[in-house]
Image: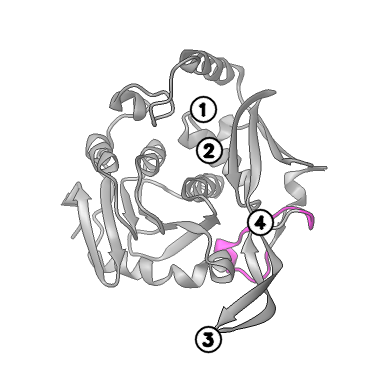
Amino acid sequence: MRISTDAIMSKPSAPQCLVADVLSDNIQAVKQYPISRWQAGSAQQTTDWVAEEVPVALEYNGLAHAVMMCSPADLEDFARGFSLSEGIVETADEVYDIQIDELSEGIQLAITIPQARFWALKSHRRSLAGRTGCGLCGKESLAQLAHNLTPLTGGPTIAVSAVQHALSQLNAQQPLFTQTGATHAAAWCAADGNMLALREDVGRHNALDKLLGHAVNRDLDLTNGMLLMTSRASYEIVQKAAACGITLIAAVSAPTGLAVRLAEELGVTLIGFARNNRLSVYAHSERIS
């Protein structure tokens, strides 16, 4: 079943600026399942909401590129954000078209990009062919890991109180997590801490890609604000954010050492353990007041 982007519907219960999209009734982000719930030594037969994850295949100009396990929502945002954060395209307008196909085994995103970008993608794929896995998807150095990104400069100075204000809005804006307890969120906030957009997914990287795709589609200024992640801060989060010009990341959990080193290299302010009126700044603390 082919779904055009015009056919994507909105969830009426979510706040307007943070609204998530779903596909058809056949593929939903959450479903109810029968369960036996045990408590105080006795069982109750009931139902529970469970987050769905489906294989989502990304195809560029007819060439299969990657398969990701995703929440089946906001997939147009995901296609656009993944293309940007992975360096497949340089600007959002280089994503010419996105077709979403519901298949029996999952969902296919058929993405059309300029021919020059497509040939660069094919060349990159050939350069990775035959390499043994090293935990960095074939990348051999930190420079390659950073996609040859130019270190970021400038960016707003953000008050600790603004970070805490942004964090205080997270719980109320995560309908999938509220229902299931199984999803991560990525949120974009203005420098004063007001939340402008949020996306959820079972995968933290997917949530970020969906947020990035939504942000560029709405012309949000990603150089003037902060990114919140309800997860640990891994190197992929730093790399994807830096690729889109984001200078400040606040994660509710810990960073990894590689994420800290990459943030230092790319000029990204990296905050960890941002919760319960506390936070720790691991890289480029000059942007925090």
Disc 4 designates what residue?
21
Q: Is residue 155 above or below residue 90?
A: below
Alpha carbons under labels 4 and 3: distance apart: 39 Å
CA gap, disc 3 and disc 2: 46 Å
Other residues around mark 1 within 10 Å, as few (<14) / some (14–19) / many (≥20): some
Quarter where residue 62 is shown: top right
Residue 22 highlighted magenta (yes or no): yes
User: Residue 82 has which mark?
Assistant: 2
Q: Position of residue 25 (x, y in %)?
A: 79, 58
Sequence-first disc among 3 and 2: 3
Query: In terms of secondary structure, where does tag 4 sit?
Result: strand
Asked whether, in this view, residue 46 is left or right of residue 217, the answer is right
| Crowd rating for badge 2 (residues with CA inside 10 Å; few <14, some 14–19, many 20+) | many
Q: Which region shows up in magenta? A: 11-26
Which callout, 2 or 1, points at the residue further toward the start of the chain? 2
> Which residue does the numbered mark 3 point to in the structure image?
40
Q: Label 2, label 1: how many angstroms apart (C-alpha)?
A: 8 Å
Tell me the distance, in whole angstroms, between the alpha carbons under discs 2 and 4. Answer: 17 Å
Q: Residue 128: give x, y in percent of width and height.
A: 47, 17
